Amino acid sequence: MSEYPRGLAAFSLEGRKALITGGNRGLGYAFTQALADAGASVAFIGRGADANQAAVDRLADAGIAAHAISADLTRDDDVQRGVDEAVHALGGLDIVVNNAGACVHNPAWDATDEQWQQVFDLNVRAVWKVSLAAGRHLRATGGGCIVNIGSISGLIVNRPQAQAPYNASKAAVHQLTKSLAAEWAPDNIRVNAVAPGYVKTEMAPVDRPELRRMWIEDAPQQRYAMPEEIAPTVVYLCSPAAAFVTGSVLVIDGGYTVY
Ligand code: NDP
C-alpha cells in the first residue's frame, strides 16, 4: 500500500491543531472555519474580546468549537502568551496562519511615522514574532506548517489609493516566508504565503464606486473575491497534499496581476 494518502484524504487536516491570527472576522474567520471543516482543531487570536466571542458563537452555529484568545500581536508579551495559550488549549500545535494585518491609505508625502510603525508592527514584526514563538514549538515537536497572508500589494502597486507602507510590508512578508522556508526545512517546518487580490472584508471597501474602475474592471475576472474563496488554498497549503510545497507565494487574484 502507498504511504501517500489518496484522493481527498490528501487534503484532510484530521487531528491537526491550528492557530489563526486575526480570526474573528474577514479572511481569518474564513480560514478558521475552513481549517476546522477540513478536520483541524482551531484557536484564533484577535484583540477584541466581544468580536472574538461573536466569532466563537458563529462558528459554534456551524458546528465548530473554536478557542478564542484575546491578544494584541504588536505586543511581544501578548504574542508569547497567545501562542502558549493556543498550545495549551489545543493540546499541541501543527499549523499557524499569520493573517492579522492592517492597511492605511495615505500618499507617501502625508504618511506619518506612526502609520508606518502601525503597519509594520502588525504586518511584519508580528508575523516574525508569532513565527518564532510558534516555530520553536513546531521544531520541538517534529515540524508543522506556517501560512503567511501576503498580498498582491507585495507584487504590484495598487491603484488609485496610495499605500506605500502596506505594499512594502507585504513584500517583506513574501520574502520573510521564503527566508524562513529555507532555514526551517531541515526542521520539517514548511512556510508558504498566499497573495490574495481584492477580497470583500472590513479592510477592503470593494463596493466603493470610485474604486470600481481600477479594483474591479481592471481584473480579468472583473470581480472581487469572498473570503471563502481564498480559504481552500490555505487548507491545501496546510495539508499533506502540499508536503513538497515550501517557500511558495501562491497568488489568488482573479488574474489581477497578469497585466
Ligand atoms: P480585517 O480588517 O477584516 O481583519 C483583520 C483581523 O486582524 C481582525 O480579526 C482583527 O481583529 C485582527 N487584528 C487587527 N489588529 C490586530 C492586532 N494588533 N493583534 C491581533 N489581531 C489583530 O482584514 P482582512 O480580513 O481583509 O485581512 C486579513 C489579512 O489579509 C491581512 O493580512 C490583509 O493584509 C490580507 N489581505 C487582505 C486583502 C483584502 O482585500 N481584504 C487582500 C490581500 C491581503 P481585532 O480588530 O479584534 O484585533
Image: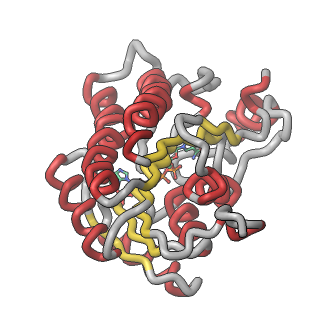
The percent position of residue 198, horizontal first and vertical second, equals 66, 42
Which quarter of the image is occupied by the C terminus?
Answer: top right
Above or below, 144 relative to 67: above
The percent position of residue 219, horizontal first and vertical second, equals 79, 33
The percent position of residue 161, horizontal first and vertical second, equals 57, 26
Above or below, 80 relative to 24: above
Above or below, 220 relative to 156: below
- 152 or 190, nearer to the observer: 190
Horizontally, is 38 left or right of 176 in the view? right
Picture residue at 50% right of the left edge, 85% below the top = 60
Name of the residue lying farthest toward the front = 1
Which quarter of the image is occupied by the N terminus?
Answer: bottom right
Above or below, 155 relative to 198: above
Name of the residue lying farthest toward the left = 77
Horizontally, is 151 left or right of 210 in the view? left
Picture residue at 63% right of the left edge, 41% below the top = 196
- In the rendered image, which quarter is residue 20 located in? bottom left
**Total marks in image:** 0
- In the rendered image, which quarter is residue 255 located in? top right
Picture residue at 55% right of the left edge, 67% below the top = 35
- 104 or 259, nearer to the observer: 259
Residue 191 shows in the view:
yes
Horizontally, is 188 left or right of 30 in the view? left
The percent position of residue 77, horizontal first and vertical second, equals 14, 52
